[in-house]
Image (cartoon, coloured by chain):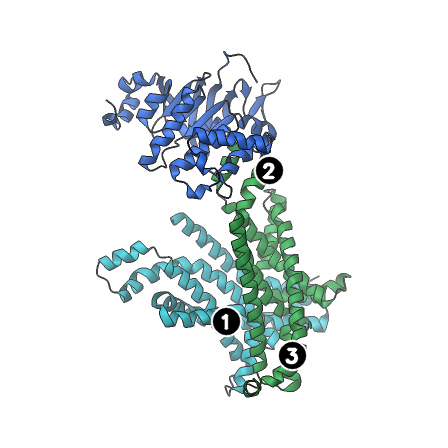
């Protein structure tokens, strides 16, 4: 075991493990907070977005399109540099979470909307013909079916979210990516450090992907 | 109200040009690269497919920023002194390539089997089937996804600023750190990106609509 | 609600309907008596499905009046004789008295057969779950599918799904049943079981309006036949008379295609 570690220069990495561990934890924290924020935001947006009331729908569409066609890094900068200027001196962590949650929330809103619209019109007709009101039809027939369709794309979007947490390194949050960068620059270490960082991200995204797979299977069984 | 933004506009325009260059190089070559390996993945199978799948898995599981840092630090140490700019373009090409290969692979696999069967019945060999039947249809179908992917990668060019390469986002941050006019500048620069990306998004959704009618 | 036996179950007066520029229903008027079985036949595009869907307000008629058991459907006339759209609740209530079976079954794939049948009675009529389950069993037994009660729709054949759809519609205890080309999407060998279920219902005295292509079936099961073309009723009368001795040119042409299927 020792020979293995020495050969690959991993002893250095081993010595830096506490720093990487802190970064890793912070990445998970940002990801978790952002996911909760994004899902909440997406769910809040869907209702008005599908309401059909033009003065509400049009601004929301504009907002979603604008967010989706501009880089997340700028939204993070806007949040971090801009919010204090309007009297909200929030921590870098919160600014980062706000930016990530609002971008991904906009994406999730569109995903949920597509899922609901994808449930065929004939299901609506079957429910309405039985004398259900639109509301009953929506909750008993349409939304359960939309939920099933929507879980895989939402899962994909959340994996992207995990990767996007690396961007908050630009505003000084010492998550996994910035930990790696700091270690390299302070100790002149070689690039293998980033291979290790990459590996940690891979473990994170793959594990999350597996959890998602289980959730999908569970939901399908429950049906 | 937007005076700071507009007075720095020439500077931002230079940055925008740099962004477009990065996009053309990274996304352009990346797309071509991705199309080739995607088609190879779908049509060859076996060892080639496995290798490509591992490649895609690695790229998609790791943030693009980390790939950029890796290229940035790794290439000089391996003796490849090609400069920061080309290091990040390289990572953009690899990153785009992975996503495009999945798009191409999906498109090739979704060409209806009966078309391939008719071509075989006519006596065409595998290479010609690929060339004349599968690829034209697959490419046509994948254009909306490719456009959406390009938008995603154009947004990714902004991340090279974190590694230290100068382009539009880097310029924006420079100006804000100097003038503190965060809202104007960042919002204005976001609009520039929007003007570049949104037309592509619109074309993609128009084409998508047209294809859903044709089927 | 009307207990006067003389009031027709369905009254349609001068119904007009357009989709954009396309006029689909051009002044349709007819009545359906209690216990009558009406079959509507006609070429594609004649408006027969649209007419049927107007009878439970899945399509909204532009002009004219529709009355179900004496109650106006969709629009009420106020004192000034102007049309006032009914509230969603009122419309839903009227719909619960009209059962509809669709060409594409429209069963809910995410629920079992039993839940498909009990969902509406429980949530709309607030029937107790145990009672709803009992009725569901009875109805499934009637259509011969009691053993499939816990299955999911995707595991059933088309004919079985359609029979479940009939049971589901009957669970709401409707006053009238509408059938929209319910066998058109089925493989030929599955058609018979569905037609048999419908025949049984007719024998029990259910008021029904059936849109169909099955000429023999229309002749066997209906009391009255309506032939539609281009949004108008061209001929109506007893099925035997209409099909053997059609009056109008259009009906003659239409039947020409089916000539070989009757004795």
For numbered disc 3, what is the local secondary structure? helix
Q: Assess disc 2: are there few (<14), some (14-19) or many (≥20) residues with their C-alpha within 10 Å of its C-alpha.
A: few
Which residue ends up furthest to the front in the rendered image? C147
Query: Which chain is tinted green?
Result: A
Disc 1 designates what residue? Answer: B58
**How far is mark 1 from mark 3, CA to CA?**
22 Å
Q: Percent position (x, y) of residue A169?
A: 65, 72
Numbered disc in front, either 3 or 2:
3
Q: Quadrant of the N terminus of chain A?
A: bottom right
Structural crowding at the residue carrying mark 3, measured as other residues with C-alpha within 10 Å and reported as few (<14), some (14–19) or many (≥20) = few
| Residue at 46% across, 53% down | B206
Q: Is residue B192 left or right of residue C152?
A: right
Distance from Cα at disc 1 to Cα at disc 2: 45 Å
Callouts 3 and 2 close, C-beta under 8 Å: no
Nearer the observer: mark 1 or 3; the answer is 3
The answer to whether residue A19 of the structure is visible from this angle is yes
Answer yes or no: are tags 1 and 2 on the same subunit. no
Chain B on-screen colour: cyan
Which residue is at the front of the view, A104 or C178? C178
Helix, strand or loop at label 2? It is helix
Q: Would you call the spot at circle 1 few (<14 residues within 10 Å), some (14-19), or many (20 or more)?
A: some
- Image coordinates of residue C165 in percent, x first then y, are 45, 34
Q: Name the residue under label 3.
A: A17
Residue at coordinates 40% horizontally, 67% vertically from top-left? B38
Kindly identify the residue that appears in the image at 66 percent across and 70 percent down.
A25
Q: What element carries label 1?
A: helix
Nearer-N-terminus badge (3/2) = 3
B51 left or right of B114 in image: right
Label 3 marks which chain's residue?
A
Q: Which mark is residue A135?
A: 2
Q: The blue chain is which one?
A: C
- Residue C191, by quadrant, is top left
């Amino acid at each position: 075991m020792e020979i293995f570690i020495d050969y690959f220069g991993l002893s250095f990495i081993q010595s830096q493990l506490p720093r990487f561990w802190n970064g890793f934890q912070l990445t998970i924290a940002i990801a978790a907070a952002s996911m909760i924020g994004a899902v909440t935001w997406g769910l809040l947006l869907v209702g008005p977005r599908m309401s059909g009331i033009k003065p509400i729908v049009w601004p929301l569409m504009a907002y979603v399109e604008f967010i989706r066609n501009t880089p997340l890094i700028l939204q993070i900068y806007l949040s971090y540099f801009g919010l204090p200027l309007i009297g909200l001196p929030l921590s870098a962590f919160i600014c980062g979470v706000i930016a990530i949650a609002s971008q991904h929330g906009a994406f999730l809103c569109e995903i949920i909307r597509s899922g609901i619209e994808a449930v065929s019109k004939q299901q609506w007709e079957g429910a309405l013909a039985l004398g259900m009101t639109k509301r009953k039809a929506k909750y008993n027939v349409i939304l359960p079916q939309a939920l099933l369709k929507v879980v895989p794309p939402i899962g994909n979007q959340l994996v992207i979210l995990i990767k996007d947490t690396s961007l908050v390194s630009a505003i000084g949050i010492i998550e996994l990516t910035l930990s790696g960068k700091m270690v390299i620059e302070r100790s002149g270490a070689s690039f293998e450090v980033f291979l290790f960082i990459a590996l940690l991200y891979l473990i994170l995204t793959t594990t999350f992907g597996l959890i998602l797979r289980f959730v999908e299977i569970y939901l399908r069984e429950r049906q | 109200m937007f005076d700071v933004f507009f007075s720095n506009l020439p500077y931002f325009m230079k940055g925008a040009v740099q962004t477009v260059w990065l996009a053309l190089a990274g996304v352009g070559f990346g797309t071509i690269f991705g199309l080739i390996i995607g088609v190879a993945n779908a049509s060859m199978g076996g060892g080639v497919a496995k290798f490509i799948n591992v490649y895609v898995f690695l790229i998609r599981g790791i943030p693009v920023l980390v790939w950029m840092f890796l290229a940035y630090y790794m290439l000089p140490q391996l003796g490849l002194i090609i400069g920061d700019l080309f290091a990040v373009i390289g990572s953009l090409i690899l990153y785009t390539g992975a996503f495009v290969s999945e798009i191409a692979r999906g498109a090739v696999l979704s060409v209806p089997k009966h078309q391939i069967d008719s071509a075989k019945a006519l006596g065409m060999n595998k290479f010609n089937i690929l060339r004349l039947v599968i690829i034209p249809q697959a490419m046509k179908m994948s254009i909306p996804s490719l456009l959406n992917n390009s938008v995603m990668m154009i947004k990714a060019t902004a991340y090279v600023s974190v590694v230290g390469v100068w382009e539009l986002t880097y310029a924006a941050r420079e100006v804000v750190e100097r003038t503190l006019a965060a809202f104007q500048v960042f919002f204005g620069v976001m609009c520039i990106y929007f003007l570049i990306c949104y037309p592509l998004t619109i074309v993609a959704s128009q084409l998508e609509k047209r294809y859903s009618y044709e089927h | 609600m009307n207990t006067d036996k003389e009031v027709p179950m369905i009254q349609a007066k001068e119904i007009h309907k357009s989709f954009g520029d396309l006029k689909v229903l051009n002044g349709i008027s007819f009545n359906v008596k209690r216990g009558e079985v009406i079959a509507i036949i006609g070429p594609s595009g004649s408006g027969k499905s649209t007419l049927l869907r107007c009878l439970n307000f899945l399509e909204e008629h532009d002009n004219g009046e529709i009355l179900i058991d004496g109650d106006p459907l969709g629009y009420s006339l106020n004192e000034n004789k102007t049309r006032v759209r009914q509230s969603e609740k009122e419309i839903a209530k009227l719909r619960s008295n009209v059962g509809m079976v669709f060409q594409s079954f429209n069963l809910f794939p995410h629920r079992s057969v039993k839940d498909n049948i009990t969902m509406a009675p429980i949530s709309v009529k607030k029937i107790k779950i145990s009672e709803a389950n009992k009725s569901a069993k009875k109805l499934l037994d009637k259509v011969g599918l009691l053993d499939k009660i816990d299955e999911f729709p995707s595991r059933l054949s088309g004919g079985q799904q359609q029979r479940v759809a009939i049971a589901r519609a009957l669970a709401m205890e409707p006053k009238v049943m509408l059938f929209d080309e319910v066998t058109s999407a089925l493989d030929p060998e599955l058609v018979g079981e569905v037609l048999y279920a419908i025949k049984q219902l007719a024998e029990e005295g259910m008021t029904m309006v059936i849109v169909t292509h099955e000429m023999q079936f229309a002749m066997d099961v209906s009391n009255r036949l309506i032939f539609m073309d281009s949004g108008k009723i061209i001929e109506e009368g007893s099925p035997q008379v209409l099909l053997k001795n059609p009056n109008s040119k259009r009906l003659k042409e239409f039947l020409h295609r089916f000539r070989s299927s009757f004795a």
